[in-house]
Protein backbone atom coordinates (compact mmCIF):
# COMPACT_ATOMS: atom_id res chain seq x y z
CA UNK A 1 0.00 0.00 0.00
CA UNK A 2 1.19 3.50 -0.78
CA UNK A 3 -0.25 4.96 2.45
CA UNK A 4 0.77 3.81 5.93
CA UNK A 5 -1.55 3.65 8.85
CA UNK A 6 -1.04 5.76 12.03
CA UNK A 7 -0.08 2.61 13.92
CA UNK A 8 2.65 1.88 11.38
CA UNK A 9 4.01 5.43 11.73
CA UNK A 10 4.03 5.31 15.56
CA UNK A 11 5.19 1.70 16.09
CA UNK A 12 7.18 1.13 12.94
CA UNK A 13 5.33 -2.05 11.95
CA UNK A 14 2.06 -2.96 10.26
CA UNK A 15 -1.15 -3.34 12.14
CA UNK A 16 -1.40 -6.95 11.08
CA UNK A 17 1.64 -7.88 13.14
CA UNK A 18 -0.03 -6.85 16.49
CA UNK A 19 -1.93 -9.57 18.37
CA UNK A 20 -5.54 -8.85 19.29
CA UNK A 21 -6.90 -6.67 16.58
CA UNK A 22 -9.37 -4.67 18.76
CA UNK A 23 -6.82 -3.63 21.44
CA UNK A 24 -4.37 -2.68 18.71
CA UNK A 25 -6.92 -0.30 17.27
CA UNK A 26 -7.16 1.61 20.64
CA UNK A 27 -3.41 1.82 21.21
CA UNK A 28 -2.90 5.22 19.53
CA UNK A 29 -4.87 6.89 22.41
CA UNK A 30 -2.73 5.38 25.20
CA UNK A 31 0.33 7.58 24.86
CA UNK A 32 -1.47 10.95 25.02
CA UNK A 33 -3.31 9.79 28.15
CA UNK A 34 -0.06 8.74 29.81
CA UNK A 35 1.53 12.09 28.91
CA UNK A 36 -1.43 14.01 30.30
CA UNK A 37 -1.41 12.00 33.52
CA UNK A 38 2.30 12.63 33.94
CA UNK A 39 1.84 16.37 33.43
CA UNK A 40 -1.03 16.35 35.95
CA UNK A 41 1.15 14.58 38.55
CA UNK A 42 3.96 17.10 37.97
CA UNK A 43 1.48 20.01 38.29
CA UNK A 44 0.04 18.60 41.54
CA UNK A 45 3.53 18.12 43.01
CA UNK A 46 4.46 21.65 42.00
CA UNK A 47 1.25 23.04 43.52
CA UNK A 48 1.86 21.15 46.80
CA UNK A 49 5.38 22.56 46.94
CA UNK A 50 4.09 26.07 46.36
CA UNK A 51 1.49 25.66 49.15
CA UNK A 52 4.16 24.33 51.53
CA UNK A 53 6.54 27.18 50.68
CA UNK A 54 3.73 29.71 51.16
CA UNK A 55 2.91 28.29 54.62
CA UNK A 56 6.57 28.50 55.64
CA UNK A 57 6.69 32.10 54.43
CA UNK A 58 3.49 32.99 56.34
CA UNK A 59 4.84 31.44 59.58
CA UNK A 60 8.08 33.38 59.22
CA UNK A 61 6.16 36.58 58.50
CA UNK A 62 4.00 36.07 61.61
CA UNK A 63 7.13 35.54 63.71
CA UNK A 64 8.58 38.77 62.30
CA UNK A 65 5.36 40.63 63.08
CA UNK A 66 5.40 39.34 66.67
CA UNK A 67 9.00 40.51 67.05
CA UNK A 68 7.99 43.88 65.62
CA UNK A 69 5.17 44.18 68.19
CA UNK A 70 7.59 43.34 71.01
CA UNK A 71 10.04 45.96 69.77
CA UNK A 72 7.27 48.56 69.57
CA UNK A 73 6.11 47.70 73.11
CA UNK A 74 9.66 48.29 74.37
CA UNK A 75 9.71 51.63 72.56
CA UNK A 76 6.35 52.63 74.06
CA UNK A 77 7.60 51.69 77.53
CA UNK A 78 10.59 53.93 77.03
CA UNK A 79 8.27 56.71 75.97
CA UNK A 80 6.23 56.19 79.16
CA UNK A 81 9.46 56.44 81.16
CA UNK A 82 10.27 59.66 79.32
CA UNK A 83 6.79 61.03 80.13
CA UNK A 84 7.28 60.15 83.80
CA UNK A 85 10.60 61.98 83.87
CA UNK A 86 9.07 64.99 82.18
CA UNK A 87 6.12 65.05 84.62
CA UNK A 88 8.56 65.03 87.52
CA UNK A 89 10.52 67.93 86.01
CA UNK A 90 7.35 69.93 85.39
CA UNK A 91 6.14 69.41 88.97
CA UNK A 92 9.38 70.92 90.29
CA UNK A 93 8.79 74.10 88.28
CA UNK A 94 5.64 74.89 90.29
CA UNK A 95 7.44 75.08 93.64
CA UNK A 96 8.78 78.28 95.21
CA UNK A 97 11.39 80.41 93.42
CA UNK A 98 14.27 78.76 95.23
CA UNK A 99 12.80 75.34 94.34
CA UNK A 100 12.29 76.02 90.62
CA UNK A 101 14.35 73.03 89.71
CA UNK A 102 14.69 72.40 86.01
CA UNK A 103 18.31 73.29 85.22
CA UNK A 104 19.93 73.54 81.84
CA UNK A 105 21.60 70.18 82.41
CA UNK A 106 18.24 68.47 83.08
CA UNK A 107 16.72 69.99 79.94
CA UNK A 108 19.66 68.72 77.89
CA UNK A 109 19.19 65.26 79.43
CA UNK A 110 15.50 65.26 78.48
CA UNK A 111 16.31 66.32 74.91
CA UNK A 112 19.05 63.67 74.68
CA UNK A 113 16.61 61.01 75.92
CA UNK A 114 14.02 61.96 73.29
CA UNK A 115 16.69 61.95 70.55
CA UNK A 116 17.99 58.56 71.70
CA UNK A 117 14.50 57.02 71.64
CA UNK A 118 13.87 58.42 68.17
CA UNK A 119 17.24 57.13 66.89
CA UNK A 120 16.71 53.63 68.29
CA UNK A 121 13.23 53.42 66.80
CA UNK A 122 14.50 54.55 63.41
CA UNK A 123 17.24 51.89 63.47
CA UNK A 124 14.84 49.10 64.47
CA UNK A 125 12.26 50.08 61.88
CA UNK A 126 14.89 50.28 59.14
CA UNK A 127 16.20 46.82 60.02
CA UNK A 128 12.70 45.29 60.14
CA UNK A 129 11.69 46.86 56.87
CA UNK A 130 14.85 45.58 55.18
CA UNK A 131 14.22 42.04 56.42
CA UNK A 132 10.52 41.98 55.61
CA UNK A 133 11.13 43.36 52.13
CA UNK A 134 12.98 40.13 51.26
CA UNK A 135 10.32 37.73 52.53
CA UNK A 136 6.84 39.28 52.26
CA UNK A 137 4.78 39.36 49.10
CA UNK A 138 3.93 42.68 47.55
CA UNK A 139 0.42 43.04 49.00
CA UNK A 140 1.37 41.84 52.50
CA UNK A 141 4.46 44.03 52.54
CA UNK A 142 2.41 47.06 51.55
CA UNK A 143 -0.07 46.45 54.38
CA UNK A 144 2.73 45.87 56.85
CA UNK A 145 4.52 49.05 55.81
CA UNK A 146 1.32 51.02 56.28
CA UNK A 147 0.94 49.59 59.80
CA UNK A 148 4.56 50.40 60.57
CA UNK A 149 4.11 53.91 59.21
CA UNK A 150 1.08 54.41 61.44
CA UNK A 151 2.88 53.17 64.56
CA UNK A 152 6.05 55.10 63.80
CA UNK A 153 3.93 58.19 63.18
CA UNK A 154 2.31 57.76 66.60
CA UNK A 155 5.72 57.29 68.27
CA UNK A 156 7.13 60.29 66.43
CA UNK A 157 4.13 62.36 67.52
CA UNK A 158 4.67 61.38 71.15
CA UNK A 159 8.38 62.23 70.93
CA UNK A 160 7.50 65.58 69.37
CA UNK A 161 5.01 66.19 72.19
CA UNK A 162 7.68 65.38 74.80
CA UNK A 163 10.13 67.77 73.16
CA UNK A 164 7.45 70.44 72.86
CA UNK A 165 6.46 70.06 76.52
CA UNK A 166 10.11 70.24 77.63
CA UNK A 167 10.58 73.37 75.55
CA UNK A 168 7.38 74.89 76.95
CA UNK A 169 8.49 74.02 80.49
CA UNK A 170 11.81 75.69 79.91
CA UNK A 171 10.08 78.80 78.59
CA UNK A 172 7.78 78.77 81.62
CA UNK A 173 10.78 78.60 83.96
CA UNK A 174 12.52 81.42 82.15
CA UNK A 175 9.35 83.51 82.16
CA UNK A 176 8.86 82.88 85.89
CA UNK A 177 12.45 83.88 86.56
CA UNK A 178 12.03 87.06 84.52
CA UNK A 179 8.80 87.93 86.31
CA UNK A 180 10.20 87.25 89.74
CA UNK A 181 13.46 89.03 88.97
CA UNK A 182 15.30 89.76 92.17
CA UNK A 183 12.38 88.70 94.37
CA UNK A 184 13.24 85.58 96.37
CA UNK A 185 10.19 84.64 98.43
CA UNK A 186 10.89 82.81 101.68
CA UNK A 187 9.36 79.40 102.27
CA UNK A 188 7.98 78.92 105.77
CA UNK A 189 8.17 75.76 107.85
CA UNK A 190 4.50 75.19 106.96
CA UNK A 191 5.32 75.08 103.26
CA UNK A 192 3.82 78.49 102.44
CA UNK A 193 5.49 81.53 100.89
CA UNK A 194 6.18 84.56 103.09
CA UNK A 195 6.56 88.16 101.96
CA UNK A 196 9.22 90.17 103.83
CA UNK A 197 8.52 93.54 102.22
CA UNK A 198 6.02 95.42 100.05
CA UNK A 199 7.48 94.12 96.74
CA UNK A 200 7.28 90.51 97.84
CA UNK A 201 3.73 91.05 99.10
CA UNK A 202 2.77 92.35 95.64
CA UNK A 203 4.28 89.18 94.16
CA UNK A 204 2.13 87.05 96.48
CA UNK A 205 -0.95 89.03 95.45
CA UNK A 206 -0.07 88.49 91.79
CA UNK A 207 0.05 84.75 92.33
CA UNK A 208 -3.45 84.89 93.77
CA UNK A 209 -3.11 81.97 96.15
CA UNK A 210 -4.65 83.89 99.11
CA UNK A 211 -6.14 87.25 100.04
CA UNK A 212 -3.77 89.63 101.82
CA UNK A 213 -4.68 92.46 104.23
CA UNK A 214 -1.94 94.87 105.32
CA UNK A 215 -1.90 96.46 108.79
CA UNK A 216 0.05 99.12 110.70
CA UNK A 217 -0.76 98.83 114.41
CA UNK A 218 0.55 100.94 117.29
CA UNK A 219 0.36 100.15 120.97
CA UNK A 220 -1.69 103.26 121.65
CA UNK A 221 -4.30 102.42 119.01
CA UNK A 222 -5.52 99.42 121.01
CA UNK A 223 -7.65 96.86 119.19
CA UNK A 224 -7.52 97.12 115.40
CA UNK A 225 -9.87 95.30 113.00
CA UNK A 226 -8.04 93.45 110.18
CA UNK A 227 -10.34 91.47 107.88
CA UNK A 228 -12.55 89.50 110.31
CA UNK A 229 -10.18 89.44 113.33
CA UNK A 230 -9.02 92.05 115.89
CA UNK A 231 -5.36 92.60 116.77
CA UNK A 232 -3.72 94.48 119.68
CA UNK A 233 0.00 95.08 120.17
CA UNK A 234 1.10 94.42 123.75
CA UNK A 235 4.91 94.60 123.41
CA UNK A 236 7.47 95.58 120.76
CA UNK A 237 11.20 94.86 121.20
CA UNK A 238 13.02 96.76 118.44
CA UNK A 239 16.49 95.53 119.43
CA UNK A 240 15.58 91.83 119.26
CA UNK A 241 12.96 92.38 116.53
CA UNK A 242 10.35 90.51 118.58
CA UNK A 243 6.81 91.35 119.65
CA UNK A 244 3.76 90.18 121.62
CA UNK A 245 0.19 90.45 120.34
CA UNK A 246 -3.33 89.59 121.46
CA UNK A 247 -5.99 88.39 119.01
CA UNK A 248 -9.73 88.01 118.90
CA UNK A 249 -10.75 85.38 116.36
CA UNK A 250 -14.52 85.57 116.42
CA UNK A 251 -15.32 85.38 120.15
CA UNK A 252 -12.17 83.42 120.96
CA UNK A 253 -9.21 85.31 122.52
CA UNK A 254 -5.67 84.28 121.66
CA UNK A 255 -2.26 85.53 122.74
CA UNK A 256 1.05 85.08 120.95
CA UNK A 257 4.25 86.06 122.78
CA UNK A 258 7.91 86.41 121.79
CA UNK A 259 7.24 86.31 118.03
CA UNK A 260 10.03 87.01 115.52
CA UNK A 261 9.54 89.16 112.42
CA UNK A 262 8.95 87.45 109.06
CA UNK A 263 7.82 84.32 110.92
CA UNK A 264 4.20 83.32 110.24
CA UNK A 265 1.72 82.97 113.10
CA UNK A 266 -0.92 80.43 112.10
CA UNK A 267 -4.41 80.00 113.57
CA UNK A 268 -7.83 78.87 112.36
CA UNK A 269 -10.93 81.02 112.31
CA UNK A 270 -13.18 77.95 112.22
CA UNK A 271 -12.54 74.27 112.65
CA UNK A 272 -11.92 72.42 109.41
CA UNK A 273 -10.93 75.53 107.42
CA UNK A 274 -7.50 76.37 106.08
CA UNK A 275 -5.42 78.38 108.60
CA UNK A 276 -4.90 82.13 108.63
CA UNK A 277 -1.30 83.45 108.55
CA UNK A 278 -0.20 86.65 110.28
CA UNK A 279 3.26 87.98 109.37
CA UNK A 280 4.97 91.06 110.85
CA UNK A 281 7.64 92.55 108.57
CA UNK A 282 8.75 95.50 110.72
CA UNK A 283 9.00 96.10 114.46
CA UNK A 284 9.33 99.73 115.49
CA UNK A 285 8.98 101.41 118.89
CA UNK A 286 5.45 100.48 120.02
CA UNK A 287 4.51 99.70 116.42
CA UNK A 288 4.28 96.71 114.07
CA UNK A 289 3.74 96.58 110.29
CA UNK A 290 2.77 93.45 108.36
CA UNK A 291 -0.06 91.58 106.72
CA UNK A 292 -2.74 88.95 107.32
CA UNK A 293 -3.20 86.16 104.72
CA UNK A 294 -6.52 84.31 104.66
CA UNK A 295 -7.88 81.57 102.32
CA UNK A 296 -9.62 82.80 99.17
CA UNK A 297 -12.92 81.06 99.87
CA UNK A 298 -13.03 82.58 103.37
CA UNK A 299 -12.21 86.03 101.96
CA UNK A 300 -15.00 85.71 99.38
CA UNK A 301 -17.51 84.90 102.14
CA UNK A 302 -16.32 87.84 104.26
CA UNK A 303 -15.95 90.40 101.50
CA UNK A 304 -19.43 91.98 101.85
CA UNK A 305 -18.87 92.50 105.58
CA UNK A 306 -15.31 93.75 105.12
CA UNK A 307 -16.19 96.30 102.39
CA UNK A 308 -19.22 97.71 104.22
Image: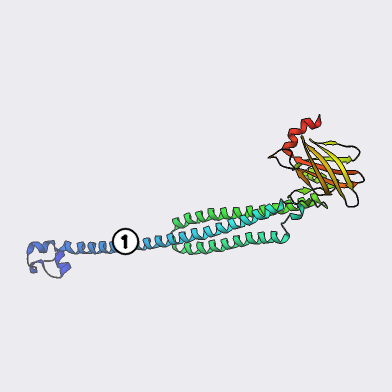
Instruction: Name the quadrant of the C terminus.
Output: top right
Res 252 → quadrant: top right
Res 6 → quadrant: bottom left
Q: Is residue 84 above or below residue 273?
A: below
Residue farthest to the top? Answer: 308
Which residue corresponds to the image point at 56% horizontal and 53% vertical from the top-left?
154
Secondary structure at badge 1 equals helix
Front-lying residue, 258 or 94: 258
Residue farthest to the right? Answer: 285
Q: Is residue 33 visible?
A: yes
Residue farthest to the left? Answer: 20
Instruction: Name the quadrant of the N terminus.
Output: bottom left
The 10 Å Cα crowd at callout 1, few under 14, some 14 to 19, many 20 or more, is few
Q: Is residue 146 above or below residue 287?
A: below
Which residue corresponds to the image point at 14% horizontal and 67% vertical from the top-left?
8
- In this rendering, the count of numbered labels is 1
Q: Position of residue 302 (x, y in %)?
A: 76, 33
Which residue corresponds to the image point at 86% horizontal and 41% vertical from the top-left?
233
Front-lying residue, 307 or 27: 307
Front-lying residue, 289 or 237: 237
Q: Position of residue 25 (x, y in %)?
A: 11, 62
Q: Position of residue 148 (x, y in %)?
A: 52, 56
Residue with the mark numbered 1 = 47
Q: Position of residue 139 (x, y in %)?
A: 44, 55
Front-lying residue, 11 or 123: 123
**46 relative to 193 in the view: left or right:** left
Amino acid sequence: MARKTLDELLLGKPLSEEPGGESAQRRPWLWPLLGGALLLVVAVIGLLYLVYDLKVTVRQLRADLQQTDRDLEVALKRLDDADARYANLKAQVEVAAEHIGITEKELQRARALAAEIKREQAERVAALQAELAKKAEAAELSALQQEHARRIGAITGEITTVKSDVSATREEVERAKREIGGIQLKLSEYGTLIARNREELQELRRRGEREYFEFDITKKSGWQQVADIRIRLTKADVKKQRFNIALYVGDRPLERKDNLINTPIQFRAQRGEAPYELVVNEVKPDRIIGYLAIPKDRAAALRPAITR
